[in-house]
Structures are given as C-alpha cells and as structure tokens.
Amino acid sequence: MSIGQELSSIDFQSMIGGPLNAVIKAQAQSAQTSVDFIKSVGFNAPDAKEDPGKPTMVSFTYDKPVEYKNEKQEIVVTNVPHKLTVPILTMLPIPYIRVEEVTIDFNAKINSVTESTTASSSELGVSLGVKGGWGPVSAELKCSYSNKKSSSSTEKIERTYSLNIHVRAVQDELPAGLEKLLSVLENNIQEVKVAGDAKAATTTTPSK
C-alpha cells in the first residue's frame, strides 16, 4: 500500500469531528450547570415550606449612625439597628463558561521501507569421453548445467499518529435575560429599621 493510500484510509471525519462534538457537548453541560446553580442557589426549592420558587434572601442586622434632635434641640448621633435583606444571587459570581477557541492538531507520520535480497548461482559441468580402437572410432560427450536463483523481498511500514487538542474557555458575559433578572433582584434589596425607638439606642457625644 502506498503512502497516499495509507493517508486516504485515515478517518479524518472521526479524528476531527469527534473532538468538536465533545466540545459542543461540554458547552451544553456547562450551560446546564449554570442553570442548576441559579435554580438551586438563587431560588427556594419548589417544595419548600416557605415561599416556594421565590428568590433566596440573606438577612443580617447592623448598627447605622442616625442623627436626630433631642429635647434640647441638640443634634445627637445614635447607632440604630437596621436590617438588610439581599437576594443571595446578587452576591455570588454566576458560573457562565464559554468555549472561546478550539485548536486540533493532527500529525500523521508514515515511513515505508522496502527491503529485497536476491541470490543466484549457476553450475556448468561438462564431461567428454572419446573411445578409440581397432574398430570404428566412438566418442561420448556428457554435459550438465544447473542454475539456482533465490530472491526475497520484505516491506516494513511504520505508522505514528498524534492528536493534540487545545481548548480555551473564558467566563462569558451574562445573557441579557440573566442581567435583567439580577437587576430586578437588586431592586428588592431592602434596608429597614429594626423595631424600636431611636432615642433608646446608644447615643454618642452630642454634635454642637
């Protein structure tokens, strides 16, 4: 088989199409992972006892300085407890990976070596005998010839294949729908004052 026939017998469709199909499936799995992350982390489970399917919120309290006037009309700074409620989805980076570049390097190295040996030998044997006597002269001639020839041929083909795949993935920009969702959730961030009178909170030195 010639080198050209060797190359034509290679299934390039599988060699190149296989990695590309794998990359497409990996991209689809990455998108599904992003969806699962948003549903499991950002929203309550559908079978949750409280607010099923609603955004998961994180709440914490802190002291916020507030100014007000006391009975003497002095401006007083008081630390008033406040409660902040934030959708957890707005606090976490959302994994959204996109395959930006795929490079497939396929190298085929075929070495074809043909070795042949030929050996030949020939042999010629001649014998001549002549008889003479009183009677009629008689002559006897003997000849022999042999030729031997042997040949052998061997063909050696070495094949070396290598396939290198380079995949470059990046954190892609969020889709427009997801950006709109985060914008709506950001509008739900609430800061409220904890129940209680500001005058009963800790008061700092009056500001004159």
Image: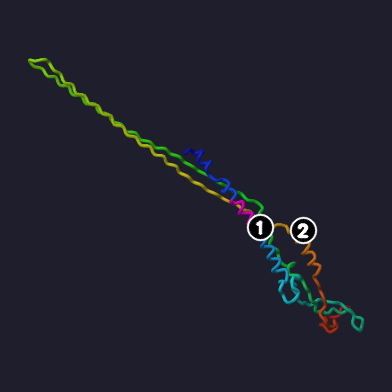
Residue 199 belongs to magenta span: no
Circle 1 sits on which residue?
28
Q: Residues within 10 Å of mark 2 (few under 14, many from 20)?
A: few
The x, y position of residue 84, in whole percent, is 78, 74
Judge by depth and name the residue closer to the eye, 26 or 105.
26
What's the amino acid at mark 1? Ala
- Distance in Å between CA atoms under marks 2 and 1: 18 Å
Numbered disc 1: secondary structure: helix
The answer to which of marks 2 and 1 sits earlier in the sequence is 1
Q: Which of 150 and 197 lies nearest the eye of the viewer?
A: 150
Left-right relation of 189 to 99: right
Q: Nearer the viewer, residue 71 or 136?
A: 136
Q: Residue 198 appears in which quarter of the rendering?
A: bottom right
Disc number for residue 92? none
Which residue lies most toward the front here? 136
Q: Residues within 10 Å of mark 1 (few under 14, many from 20)?
A: few
Where 93 sits versus 82, above or below? above
Report the side of 143 relative to 39 (left or right).
left
Quarter of the rendering containing residue 63: bottom right
Expressed as whole percent of the image width and height from the top left, the position of residue 91 reads 73, 68
Q: Which SS class for mark 2?
A: helix
Three-letter amino acid code of the residue under disc 2: Ala
What segment carries the magenta color? 18-30
Nearest-to-viewer mark from 2 and 1: 1
What residue is pinned by disc 2? 176
Q: Measuring 32% from the left and 34% from the top, which residue is drawn there? A: 150
Q: Is residue 153 above or below residue 74?
A: above
Which coloring applies here?
rainbow
Q: Position of residue 18 (x, y in %)?
A: 58, 51
Does residue 27 show up magenta in the picture?
yes
Task: Assign the magenta stretch its main secondary structure.
Answer: helix
